[in-house]
Image (cartoon, rainbow, N blue to C red):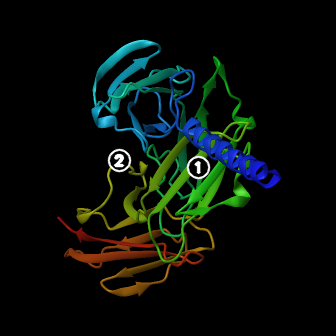
Amino acid sequence: MIKSLSKIFFLSTALLAFLFSINFVSAQSMPGVSGQLAGVEMSVSPEKPKPNQDVSVSVVSYSLNLDSATIRWYIDDVLKKEGVGIKDLNLRTGKSGESVDVRVEVFTNDGRSVEQSIIINPAEVSLIIEANSYVPPLYKGRAYFTSQGIAKIIAVPNIIQNDIKLDSKKLSYKWTMNGIVLGSQSGTGKNTVIIEGSIPIRDITVDLEVMDVSGRIVATESAFINISNPKILFYENSSLYGILSNKAISGNYNIGGKEEVRIVAKPYFFDFSGINTKESNYKWSVNGKTVSLSGAKNEILLRQDGKTGGAASVSLKIENQVRIFQFAENNFNITFGN
């Protein structure tokens, strides 16, 4: 009798355990009280939008069939788009700090529903590139970045949160050059970076991530820096008017009946501090023969040989003695006599 009761108790306990396990597993797959289901993700492209930029918001799910579901899109609680299988919404951001609340509602054919939202807060950071290359005084153009050159890049963030513009000194900057993180030049308040061209010579891509005090990325920007070539321009140095900077000498240059003329060479975009510095080397030649100069390295005096007139080919090569991949050549023909 005791054995029979024990057997009945064991079977009853096992049956209860089995039924409990069925109910527990079933409860895991049921929707919650709110009727929402997990498994819906939203994404924004581009990931870090700038002010007044066209963006696309998408929704994906690995547990729901969105192609047959009714999807509603809201912007700041205003219905903007509705339909079956509409998984994308296009919009345009406002000015910096003007956030947009995008919400999506998904209704499946079997009565399930889920909603998700994302806040888009446009922000921007501008990059100012200042090449360190030489340009003559009063030159109105900008300096170019050349082979083995040096440049300073300044980040100017315009990031507004809760109607307050964030202090650039309190933001953190992560600088990357050609995929390599510039760790020593990255960090809080480091909105300026110095870059230098490498060997082999190639164009440079600089990427920047700006983070707030919480470590969240709030803005990104990239700059593509082309490698330019140094240049040489020639000008006549008139005894009456000085250097005639309004017209560069090129091709054939006729000086008429003048017995002599002084030509000045001006280098552009070399990474040295001045025209006649030690790191600069000038190689003048006339009709293929090297000419030694006693005065300034960037000036040559040409005299007419006889009174019958004639012509000569003048050329110059300038080399940076420190940065050997910085060099330039130029030439012109000068004609004497009427």
Number of numbered tags placed on the structure image: 2
Q: Front-most of 28 and 330? A: 28
Is residue 332 found left or right of 37 in the rendered image? left
The answer for how far apart the CA atoms under marks 1 and 2 are is 32 Å
* Residue at 56% in and 22% down: 97
Helix, strand or loop at mark 2: loop
Q: Is residue 92 above or below residue 188?
A: above
Q: Front-most of 190 and 82? A: 82
Q: Is residue 263 visible?
A: no
Whole-percent x and y of residue 257?
A: 24, 63
Whole-percent x and y of residue 84?
A: 27, 27
Whole-percent x and y of residue 206?
A: 53, 55
Q: Quadrant of the C terminus?
A: bottom left
Whole-percent x and y of residue 318?
A: 46, 74
The extreme right residue here reads: 2
* Res 275 → quadrant: bottom right
Badge 1 crowding class, 10 Å Cα cut-off, few under 14, some 14 to 19, many 20 or more, is some
Q: Is residue 109 above or below residue 307?
A: above
Amino acid type for the residue under numbered disc 2: Asn
Q: Decide: marks 1, 2 in contact (CB < 8 A)?
A: no
Q: Which residue is mark 1?
A: 153
Helix, strand or loop at mark 1: strand
The extreme front residue here reads: 1
Label at residue 127: none
The extreme top residue here reads: 78
Badge 2 crowding class, 10 Å Cα cut-off, few under 14, some 14 to 19, many 20 or more, is few
Amino acid type for the residue under numbered disc 1: Ile
Q: Which residue is mark 2?
A: 246
Is residue 258 found left or right of 97 in the rendered image? left
Is residue 7 found left or right of 125 in the rendered image? right
Q: Is residue 215 above or below residue 250?
A: above
